Image: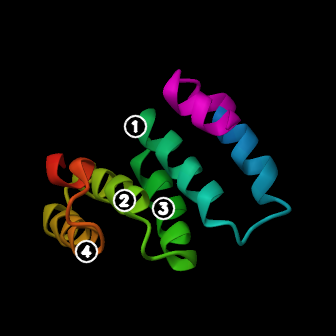
Amino acid sequence: ETLQLCIDYEYPDEGIKIANAVLETVTYNSDFWQYKGTLHNQIGEYEEALLALEKSLELNSFDTETLINHAIALEALGNLNEATKTLEKAMEIEPSNIDVLLS
């Protein structure tokens, strides 16, 4: 919940510190990798975001929120084709997700 609050209220630096602390002991949790990637996206650190989100997808390749954030990082880095493919995968998983449709 604390990490979601950091995202919602735009405290990315604090959120990244928390995510890193948790990931030191729980490296296999896709949610914390996804939070870390989202927080890096918030502050424009797209390469770091991409690394964290790819780790999250290795652990859970069917999370649409992670796929959306992955596409955001890819697009910001100029990888439009890969971003489109990522969003298409998210659409296959959850075709009625409004966030995927808007992305």
- Could you give the CA–CA distance between mark 1 and mark 3, rounded to whole angstroms? 14 Å
- Identify residue type, mark 2: His
Indicate the secondary structure of the residue bearing disc 1. Answer: loop
The residue labelled by disc 1 is: 44
- Could you give the CA–CA distance between mark 4 and mark 1, rounded to whole angstroms? 24 Å
Residue occupying the far front of the picture:
96
The residue labelled by disc 4 is: 89
The image shows residue 63 at horizontal and vertical percentages of: 44, 66
- Identify residue type, mark 4: Lys
The residue labelled by disc 2 is: 70
The image shows residue 65 at horizontal and vertical percentages of: 40, 56
Mark in the foreground, 1 or 3: 3
- Towards the viewer: 48 or 20: 20
Q: Are marks 2 and 1 in contact (CB under 8 Å)?
A: no
Q: Are marks 1 and 3 in contact (CB under 8 Å)?
A: no
Residue occupying the far right of the picture:
25
- Identify residue type, mark 3: Leu
Q: Overall secondary structure of the magenta stretch? A: helix
Compared to 32, does 89 lie above or below? below
Mark in the foreground, 4 or 1: 4
Q: Upstream in the sequence, badge 1 or badge 3? A: 1
The image shows residue 6 at horizontal and vertical percentages of: 60, 29
Q: Which label was assigned to residue 53?
A: 3
Q: Upstream in the sequence, badge 2 or badge 1? A: 1
Q: Upstream in the sequence, badge 4 or badge 2? A: 2
- Towards the viewer: 3 or 77: 3
